[in-house]
Amino acid sequence: METQHVATAARLLAHDTFDNRCVLRPIMDQTTSRWATLIVSALVAGPHRFAQLHQRVGGVSQKMLSQNLKALARAGLVDRHVAPTTPPQVTYDLTELGVGLAGPLTELIQWFGRHGDELLAAQERYDRRQEPPHAS
């Protein structure tokens, strides 16, 4: 039993994302960026073509969308399907691994929606405390 605990601990420590040398840090950084989070969450609804994703994820440039889709595909979270049509139709869909990540990411987005008023009020309170006192 002790050997199993040691093996589990070693496996967990092998990917200590708090360590700046962790090989998963770059993947974590890419997949938890603002755009990647929104892209993965948009793909929860099913496959999307590039133009659909561009329209759904407001504010993302085509370049950033393309870069993020490539990073998500490289991480094994998104599949890129090319239909043999003229012109080729490209769709993006979550992989099984991507579906597993989509749950926590969409929950995070929903959390922001539920607590938006509180977050904005907290920012206002903070900003008021940072203002210099008015000279009389």
Image: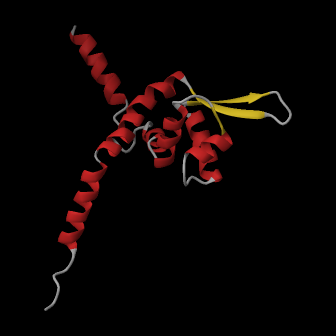
Farthest-out residue, top: 1
| Residue 34 x %, y % | 46, 48
| Residue 113 x %, y % | 35, 44
In which quadrant of the rendered view does residue 56 lie?
top right
Q: For the C terminus, which image quadrant?
A: bottom left
Name the foreground residue: 133 vs 115: 115
**What's the residue at 36%, 39% (across, down)?**
110
Name the foreground residue: 96 vs 59: 59
**What's the residue at 28%, 46% (across, down)?**
115
Q: Is residue 53 left or right of residue 15?
A: right
Name the foreground residue: 111 vs 14: 111
Q: Is residue 4 left or right of residue 56?
A: left
Q: Is residue 19 visible?
A: yes
**What's the residue at 74%, 30% (across, down)?**
82
| Residue 116 x %, y % | 31, 50
Image height check: is 45 above or below 65? above
Q: Is residue 10 left or right of residue 130?
A: right
| Residue 65 x %, y % | 60, 47
Farthest-out residue, right: 86
Q: How is the image coloured?
A: secondary structure
Name the foreground residue: 54 vs 15: 54
Q: Is residue 18 visible?
A: no
Image height check: is 45 above or below 34? above
Q: For the N terminus, which image quadrant?
A: top left
Farthest-out residue, left: 136
In which quadrant of the rendered view does residue 134 lie?
bottom left
Image height check: is 109 above or below 2? below
Total labels: the figure holds: 0
